[in-house]
Amino acid sequence: MSSQAQPYHLPLDAQSLRDAVEAHQKYLEGRSGGRRLSLTYADLSNCSLEGLDLREADLAGAKLTGAMMAKVNLSRAILFGADLREADLRRANLKRADLRGACLRGANLAGAELAGCDLREGRIALQDKLDGFRILRHEHRPGELNYAVLTGANLAGAQMTSTVAMASDFTDANLAGAQMSGARLMRAVLDGADLSGADLGGADLSGASMKRTVVAGANLEQTRLDDVDMTDVLRGPPPIVYVDDRALDEVLADHEVYCDSQGRKGGIMTIPGVDFRPIRSLRGRRLTGLNAPNCIFFGLDMQRVELQGADLTGCDFRGADLREADLRGAKFLGAQLTRADLRGAQLGPLMISEGRFVRTDFTRASLRAADLRGASAKRARFLEADLTQAKMAGCDLTGAELET
C-alpha cells in the first residue's frame, strides 16, 4: 500500500493568516508575543495583502499567484522560489528582497521599489518522504519576468544576471547599475529606461524597444541588439561642449551677466540642442529667460537654479535635482521630467508687469514618478501631462490646469 506525497503548497485559512500578520507586527515593533512571519510553501494565491508591513518576512516557495499586494512592504523579505505570477505588486517595496528563482510572469510591478533586490535564477530542493529531495518547479521557468509590467519601477543595482524577461515592460524604469549580463530581454520595452552603468554583457535584446533609453556607461559588450529601436538613445556625454566655438560654461557666464545687470549688458542666449551634462552642476546659477529647447539636463544637480521664463521645450530633465528651483513662467512643453526632484520648486506664474503674468507650462510633459512635494504650482498648466506615480503631497495646485 502506497501513500501519497505531501503537497508542496499548504493552504492557509484567513484567520491563521491574520494571526500570523499580527504576530509579525509585534515582531517588527519589538513587542511581547512577536514572531517573524514564516509562511514558506504556503498557498496564498489570490489573497489580499495590500499595504501590509511584511518587512523581513519569509515567504520562500510560497504560492502568491494573483495575490493583491499593492503597496505592500516586503523590503529584505525572502521570496526565494515564490510563485508571483500575475500578482498585483504596484508600488510595492521590495528593496533588497531575495527574489532568486521567483516567477513573476505577468506580474504588475509598476512603480515598485526593487533597488538592490536579487532576481537571479535559483531553484528550491524540497524533501519528500517518498522521493527524497525534489526540485520545486513552477509552471514556468523560475527567475522569469516574461510579460511583467515594471513601468517606472526602481531596479537600481538589482541582480538580474541571466534573468528571462521577454516582452516585459520596463518603460521609464530605473535600472542604473543593474547586473543583467546574459539576461534574455527579447521584445522587451525599455523606452526611457535608465541603464546608466548597467552590465548587459552577453544579454539578448533582440527586437526590443529602447527609444530614449539611457546607456551612458553601460556595458554592451557582446550584447545582441538585432532589430532594436534605439531612436534618441542617450549615450555618454562629450568631455566638453562648444557653442559657436565658445565653451558652454563661458556662454552661460555671459548670460548670467545679462541677468545680473537686469538686461543692461549682454543678451538672452539661444542655445538649442545642447548637452549640459559635461558641466555637471548648475546649482544656484542665474539663467533667467534662457532659450534652450531640446537640451539635455539628464541627472544634473540644479538645486535653486533660476530659470524663470526660460524656453525648455522638449528638454531632458530625467533624474535631475531641481529642488527649490525657480521655474516660474518656464516653458516645459513635451519635456522629459521622469524621476525629477522638484521638491519645493517654484512653478507658479511669473509676473512680467502689473496685472500681467506668464504661467509655467508642462503641456504634454512626462512627469512620471517625479517628486513635487511641497512645490508651488499655482496656475501651472499640466494639459496632457503624464503624472503617473508622481508624488504630489503638499504641492499647491491652486488654479492649476489639470485634466481629470
Image (cartoon, grey):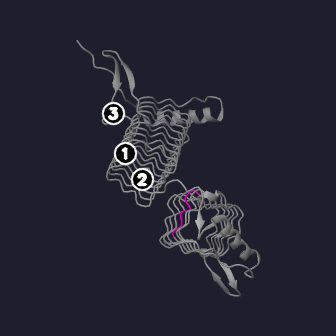
Q: Disc count in the image?
A: 3
Residue contact at pointers 2 and 1, CB within 8 angstroms: yes
- Picture residue at 40% right of the left edge, 56% below the top: 230
Q: Measuring from the top left, give residue 28's x and y in whole percent.
A: 62, 35
Residue furthest to the right: 261
Most frequent secondary structure within the magenta stretch: loop
Kindly report the distance in space between the C-alpha atoms of the residues bearing marks 1 and 3.
Answer: 20 Å
Which structural element holds mark 3? loop
Q: Is residue 395 magenta?
A: no
* Sooner in the amino-acid sequence: mark 1 or mark 3: 3
Q: Position of residue 66 (x, y in %)?
A: 38, 44
Gap between marks 2 and 1, in whole Å? 9 Å
Residue on which the image places disc 3: 138
SS at mark 2? loop
Residue furthest top as drawn: 1
Report the residue marked by disc 2.
190
Q: Position of residue 173 (x, y in %)?
A: 48, 52
Residue at horizontal 43%, vertical 36%?
161
Q: Earlier in the sequence, mark 3 or mark 2?
A: 3
> How busy is the neighbourhood of tag 3: few (under 14 within 10 Å), some, or many (20 plus)?
some
Q: Residues within 10 Å of mark 1 (few under 14, many from 20)?
A: many
Residue type at mark 1 is: Leu
Residue 185 disc label: 1
> In the image, residue 169 lies at what x, y percent?
40, 52
Whole-Å distance between the Cαs marked 3 and 2?
A: 27 Å
Side of 132 relative to 384 (left or right): left
Q: Amino acid at mark 2?
A: Leu
Q: Which residues are magenta?
A: 314-319
Q: Is residue 45 above or below residue 110?
A: above
Tell me the quadrant of the picture where the N terminus can be found: top left
The residue depicted at 65 percent of the width and 35 percent of the height is: 29
